[in-house]
Structures are given as C-alpha cells and as structure tokens.
Image: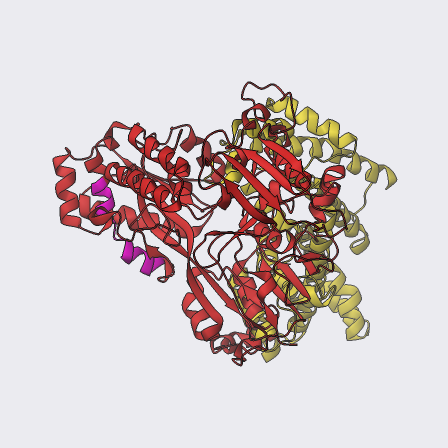
Amino acid sequence: MGRYLARRLLYAIPVLLATTFLIHALVFVLPGDPIQGLAGDRPVPPSVLAELHHRYHLDDPLFLQYAKYVRGLLGGDLGRTFTGEPVADALVGRWQVTLRLGLTAWFLEAVLGVGLGLWAALRRDGPADKAVLAGTTLVVAVPVYILGYLAQLVLGVRLGWFPVSGVEAGWPASYLLPGLVLASFGVGYVARLTRSSLLENLRSDYVRTASAKGLSRRRVVVRHTLRNSLIPVTTFLGVELGSLLAGAVVTEYIFNLPGIGQQVFQAIQLHEGPTVVGITTVLVLVFCLANLAVDILYGVLDPRIRHD
Amino acid sequence: MTLLALALPAAALAGCARGAADDQRDVPAVPGGAYSVALTEPDHLTPGRTTSSYALQVLEGLFDTPVTLDPHDGHPVPLAARSVQTDDQRVWTLSLRPDTSFHNGERVTARSFAAAWDAAAYGPGGWDANSYFAQIEGYDDLNPTDGHAPATRHLSGLTVLDDTTLRVTLKAPFSQFPMLLAFPAFAPLPQAAFADPEGFDLHPIGNGPFEMDGGWQRHQRIDLRRATGYTGSRPPMADAVHFRIFTSKDTAFTELRAGHIDFVTNVPAARAYEAKRTFGRHYSVQPSGTMDYLGLPLWDQRYADPRVRRAISMAIDRKGITRAIYNEVFTPADSLVGATIPGHRAGACGETCSYQPARARELLRQAGGFSGTLELYFANSDPTYLQWMTAVANELRQNLDIRDIAFRTMSGADLAPLLSGHKATGPYRQNWVADYPSEQNYLAGLLGHGNRTGWRNPGFDEQLALGDAAATAEQSIACYHRAEDLALQDLPLIPLWNWQDQTAWSGRVGNILLDPYVAGLHLEQVTVRH
C-alpha cells in the first residue's frame, strides 16, 4: 500500500509539469496583447507598454517564459496578477472560498443524493420514488444559472431565509444556498445512480441468501447491499469533487463569491498567464488526489479489490 | 432540492421586492449614519495607478484633487488649490490651501503634488495614468521610446516655489489644463506612498473627507469613515461609506432589491423598466460622457471615399437600436462629443447622423458601390456589442444592399493591437469615456496624432492647437467647433449613441448628487436615515 501510494504521488509530478507547460503554451499562443487589452480603447504610451511587457515576461519566447515561471515556482513565487497582487496571495484567499463552497456542495451531493436514492429504491414505484424521479429529472434539466437566480430571488430576497450573495455571513450560512445550487445536478445524478445500483443488487442471489438467513432488513440493506452499490457512486463523487471546484464559475458569479471560479474566468479573459497556470496547477493536484482517494476507497468498500 | 422544486412556481409570481426601497419619505438632512454602495473590483487605489471608474469612485472620497468640476456644467472649481492661474496658457501657477494634512497627519505641500505627478509620469513605473501627464514639460525625458531607462525621475516642468505654490510649465499652451487637474491622478501623495507602494495601494492615505477604515479587502469590500482632521471644503454628512464589491451587476441589483445595499450606480440596461417600476423616484437616468462610435479603416481603399462613410452612417437607425437593445437608456448621438460637455452642439452632425436609407443607397451608388466582404470588428467583452453589431449589419444589408457581411469578434487583448496597428480591414466598435468635460478631450483623443482611423487633416490639427492656446473658454470652444466640423465632414468616425448612467438607491439615503464627470456619486453629500 505504501509503495502504491508513493508511486501514485510520483506520477503526479510529470502530470503537473506537462499540464503547466501546456497551459502556459496555450496562453502564450493566444494572439493579441494583454496589456493593450487592459487599457481598452485608450492607447498606452510606448514607454509604459515596454515596461509592463518586461515586468510580466511578455517579451520573452515561450520556453524562457516557462523556465522563468518554473524557477519562480521552485522559490515559492507564483508571479503577480496584472493588478500587482501576488498570485499566491490571491490563490490562498480564493481557494478558501471555493473549497468551502465545493465541500459544502459535495457533502450535500453525497448525503442528499445517497439518501434520496436509498429512500426511492426502498419504496420502489411508490409516491416517494416517483417524487424523487420527477424532482431529479427537473434539477438535472434546468440550467444552473436559472436555478441560481430563482433560488436567490425566492429564498434570498422574498423569503429572506438565506443571504442573497457574498460571503460575509461566513460558513455555513453564506454557502448553503450556492452550495445547493452547485450541487443540484450532482444530487440528481447521485440519487438516480444510487437508486438503480441498489435496485439491481437487491435482486441478487447473495441478498436473497442474507435475507433467508434471517438477517434484519436494515442489516441486509446497509451492510450487504448499500456497500456494494456505492462503488459507482464513489467513482462519481471522486471525480465530482474536482469538477465542483473547477466548475463553480457560474455559481460564484451569481452569488458573488470571491472564489477561484470567478478568478479563472477573469484571468483567461485578460490573458493573465501566471494566474491561469497557478490555478490550473492546484486543480490538477486536486484531481490527482481525488482519484487516488477513490482508488483507495474501492478497497475499503470491496475487499476483493487490492492495491500492491 | 424538493424545496427548490416547489419554489419554482412561486418565483414566477415574484413581483416587487420588500425592503427599504419602498420608503418614499424624505431623508432628514442630519449628519451621521453609514450607507453602502455596490462597486466593481477596482484595479488600484493609488490615484496615479488607475483610470478605472470603479477606483475613481472610491478615490473621490479619499482624495482632494487641486480642482474639482462643477457637477452641473463641468467648469473647474478650486478644491485643494486656492487658485490656478496663467497668463499664456502654458505656465500655470497653483496656489494651494495652507495647513491641510493627510489622514496620517503629514502636511500636504506643493512637494506632495510634485512627487505624485513625477511618479505617475515616470514610464518605468508602469502607472496607468501616465499619459495624463504628457503635456507637461519633461514628460518625454521620463518616457524614452528607445528602450533606455530615463536619466531623471523628475518632470522638468514642475517647480516647487514654496510650500503652497507649484509652478507647472507645459510643452505647449493648453487652455483645458485646469480641467485635467480634477482627475484623481493629480491628487497629492504622502511619503508613505513611496516607502511601501504595495501596502499603500491596499491602504491609501489621502487628504480627502473620508479615510480608509481598515485595508481594502480584495473582491469583497472597502470601508471608508469620516476623516477626523479634514479641514477642506466638502465635509461629509455620513460617518461611513461601505463599498461592497460585486462581479455581477445583476446580483448587485438583486441585493438592492433585498434592501441589503443602498446604491447601485450601474443598473444593467436590460433592467431599466424593472428599476423604474420598483424604485420610482429613487431611480435616475442621466447622460454620461461615454459614447460609442463606429470607426472606419481609412487605409482600406473601400472606405477612402467620404461618401461611402456617410452612406454607412445614414443607413444606421440609431433610434431603433437604442430602443431595442438598450431600452432607451442610451440616446442617439448627433455630434462627436458627449451631450454633457460644455460647448456640445445638438445636431452638429446634421443629416449625416440621421436615418435616411434612400439617400444612403444613393450616396453609395455615386461613390461606386462596395465590393468584397464588409467585416465588423468588436470585442466580446459584453453581449450587447454583438446585439447592436447584428442590428447594424442587418441595416447595412437592407439599406445599402451589401450582402456579404462578417463579424470579427475577439477578446479586447486581441482587438487592441489590431486596431492600433491599422490591421483591421473593416469598421470597428470605438468607445470613448471622457476624462474631463472638454470637446478637446474627444477630438484629440479620438482623432489626434496617430489615431486608429488613420485620418489626417492639417486644418483639424491647427484648429485644435488654436483652441489649446486661446485665452478664454469661449474662444477655445469656437476653435474646437471648427475642428469638429472638419471631422464630421470627412467622417472617419461615425457617432452612434451616448451612454446614460442608471442609478437606483434605497429609501435610507437622501441628498443624492450624481455628476457625469469624474466624481460620479458625491459621497460626502449623501445623508442617511438613522
């Protein structure tokens, strides 16, 4: 297990180098001049233009730019955004917001999704099952921004149950509503996945055997069926953690959360190389670790799966 | 989730909002209280480092510039200066108010101004407002174009005569100079700004009616409180102003409806009717100095004939577009300068800017028609650009029978070098935000030396120079009018529409003074019900 872990972690290094280089190259080949773009319709004096090009290494060729970036990275310097804020500082502040939002959404997905799926599967074809099926179809089908504005208007403005936007009320108050909106698609998906997987396993031979032995229904469902049925759900939730962190752009915009999603959107628009690469690096790391955690969890859920 | 699903039908019925907006009583004009303003994240809070209107709104409270602009007609009024005088429009003497100080107690002297202007004009500093100092003697030494570092850090045109007197020598006479002095980049800076520039940018120390209350919390909030030692001419009514930073203007407006903030100074045009309905007399629409134009690439032979350019202008139904896309919040333009500018002549553009499809088609026929693809260039930073460009394209198709029209849409970073390098091969979106309320700002900025359209006209340059050297405002305006007429005759740039500012506020605040010039919302005037 230790060797397996070490090997998987070492794999992450070339993945990280390759991704950062790729993103760097992609930002580099974008045509246009980010500094002139910043100024809008006003011409920038040549002296200022030259200085800013030099400051952000925009006048260097691609490989030199990348080498300078990696050298800075090794010294703990992620560069600066175009407003002069160190990228590292920006990332720390913003990751806290996105991480809180992502984990809240992820937690809601796991608890609500598995709970609703379980509830529906155990009451197959009953009104509860039909309600879950209809509800999940709806939330999976409605685009996030419509759901977001609706939730904001109804639960925030009209009823006043939640803050409308911002993070000033802290966790969890500020994060519940955007977390729910962000999780809506996942909740629907996880509930349906849990339901069908559970229904399939409830019909299998070993479940019938367990029931025949006289085990309580609770024990049969929780220990014998649910554990098996959660393997596809775990895979989904593992990948989903990464997607939640990366995909919060719309939710953060609607709810005015100063997180990574907002920043990556702005940074791409402004051609802000260091910021885009910095965010991507952390995202790749999260994806690598989430995948590793999923693989390890398989062994816990199904003892037949071994890592060595 | 079920909760949300149930809430769906209820939302469709959601009419007007609860909250403070319903309070239509007058706000008593007593000092004290705090109010909040929705803001977009500024880029910097050091005056010379920014030209962004969001930053300027905060700096309006933090700094007193040498002069300010009258909110009604834009004429310069002394603020940190007692007077600004000249005999020849070239050498200007600023006498400053004595015994004023920064928020940290440091005295404001002529040196505080000179140091700030030197820093902003120094090219290698890379400060945003650098070009505002281009008229001062010595600017070129601080901004060499040959790639070498400047030999000096000081503008040779600045002379500190004593603590309260600053002499400014310009490269050439420039009668509009006092207006420039109302721009925040001309505010003084204390020593602290140079000792720790990055720290200062997060916690600026100014000489204005408000001071920072804690640092700038990026992407979240900026808090100002009444400055205790302020002795200037605009003491604030409220005790504190809280700026809350939003990325989405729609979300800011929703927060205003919920009663959580007091001002939204950028109500999205799409929500104009809703704002009017919801906020009634707590909603104002007023002309701004910002304009949109269609620029023409004069280096492309197809656009070289002025008749072609006039035909394009006459084929555009400005009124129809501003109504359909901007809910009548924008107004059709009939001049090259904004409607809020002293000297603005309504209808200066004449029939060239009116919608006359038949005449347009006739003009184009006379000029020999149009061949090839007509490409329209614009940035993708706002979805309404595509909407109005589509409308323009349809009108050119319909009215001029130009069948082959293509959009060249890209990010601002891609578009800017294409335009400044004269590589665009079709009409482009040009926008201008006035820095100071003078016709000169539009004409020189848009059509002066090295402009994007490639237009050159010695008569135009001559009239601008005459206006810059004139001794009275009337004389300069007359010269600028002649210059504008020359430009409108040739039409390298087609005026489209004037922007207007939409502001909505809650029932908690009163005495709202908004101006279309640099200051925006006059923070110190606002009174609060408390």
Residue A260 placement, left or right of B291 = right
Q: Colour of chain B?
A: red
A81 to A115, vertically: above or below: above
Which of B149 and B361 lies nearest the eye of the viewer? B149
Q: Residue B114 appears in which quarter of the rendering?
A: top right
Q: Nearer the viewer, residue A234 or B179?
A: B179
The residue most toward the front is B87
Which is nearer the eye, B450 or A53? B450
- The quarter of the rendered structure image containing the C terminus of chain A is top right
Whole-percent x, y for residue B263 in the image: 56, 65
Tell me, yes or no, whether the highlighted magenta stretch contains residue B316.
yes
Count the marks. Answer: 0
Quadrant location of the N terminus of chain A in the rendered image: top right
Q: Residue B281's spot in the image, x, y percent?
A: 46, 74
| Residue A72 seen from this side | yes
**From the viewer's perspective, is B143 left or right of B324?**
right
Magenta stretch secondary structure, dominant: helix
Colour approach in the figure? by chain
Query: What is chain A's hue in the picture?
Result: yellow
Q: Position of residue A216 (x, y in %)?
A: 81, 75
Find the magenta span and give its range.
Answer: B310-325
Compared to A53, does B288 lie above or below?
below
Residue A29 position in % (x across, y down):
53, 29
Which residue is depicted at the point 14% across and 33% down? B368
* The magenta stretch spans residue B8: no
Q: Nearer the viewer, residue A81 or B74?
A: B74
Residue A139 can be seen, yes or no? no
Residue at left offset 64%, top offset 49%: B97
Q: Quadrant of residue B485?
A: top left
